[in-house]
Amino acid sequence: MQAPRSTASLADIAARVGDIGKRPLSALETSQNASAELRVRAATPADRAFVMHAAAHLVDFAVPTGLDVALIRTVDARELSAVFALSKPGEAIFIAEQSDGQPIGFLHVGEREDFYRGPCAHVGDVVVLPEARGQGAGRALLEAARRWAVEHGYSCMTLSVFAENLAARHLYETLGFVAETVRMVMPACSSDDR
């Protein structure tokens, strides 16, 4: 199976997750979400260690053939470090945490140029720790990303997901993301060519 690249209209996502678009981001960052035990806030430099640790869970499922887990972790660590170093302006990281302040997940969002739609908000990473999955953290993080997208004037939000990450795909589909393209990959040369 191939990893679909998905998009959803912000209006469609808003209809499914509730109209949080009228609240300022600062209120979202400190307000309670759907679960009384959960809140989402903007990341601070103090969250860097948690984000880097949690990013290891980006490969908690079958990684596509031909991709190296160590390479995936290295690339994600480099991208996330750049956001914390403020060398990637126009990007944000949100933290989902329990009411006691214990972080349980994060989301990384920024801008990506879509071939047909132009600039879109793009969710680069969504990670919820295994012990906290199924409690609404992923949904709450995506709500925060949608708000960020609206506040930054984007008309759509995109994300990519590995084909075998079925739980994530299901969540994205319930929020209104739909597969728009399928990216297919093949080696440019075989072992016989070397």
Image (tube, grey):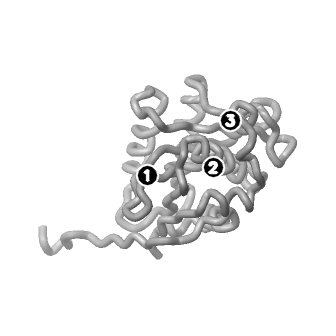
Q: Position of residue 34 (x, y in %)?
A: 82, 48
Secondary element at image label 2: helix
Q: Which residue is mark 2?
A: 146
Instruction: Identify the element where label 1 is drawn.
Output: strand
Between the residue at mark 1 and the residue at mark 3, the CA separation in whole angstroms equals 21 Å
Q: Residue at x 65, y 43 (%)?
A: 105
Left or right: residue 113 versus residue 159 is: left
Q: Amino acid at mark 3?
A: Leu
Residue 59 image position (x, y, % from top left)? 51, 54
Badge 3, how many Cα within 10 Å: few under 14, some, many 20+?
some
Q: Is residue 128 visible to us here?
A: no
Mark 1 vs 2, N-terminal side: 1
Task: In this rendered view, identify the residue nearer to me: 131 or 89.
Answer: 89
Residue that numbered label 3 is attached to: 25
Residue drawn at 65 percent across, 37 percent down: 95
Q: Nearer the viewer, residue 70 or 75?
A: 75
Q: Which residue is mark 1?
A: 119
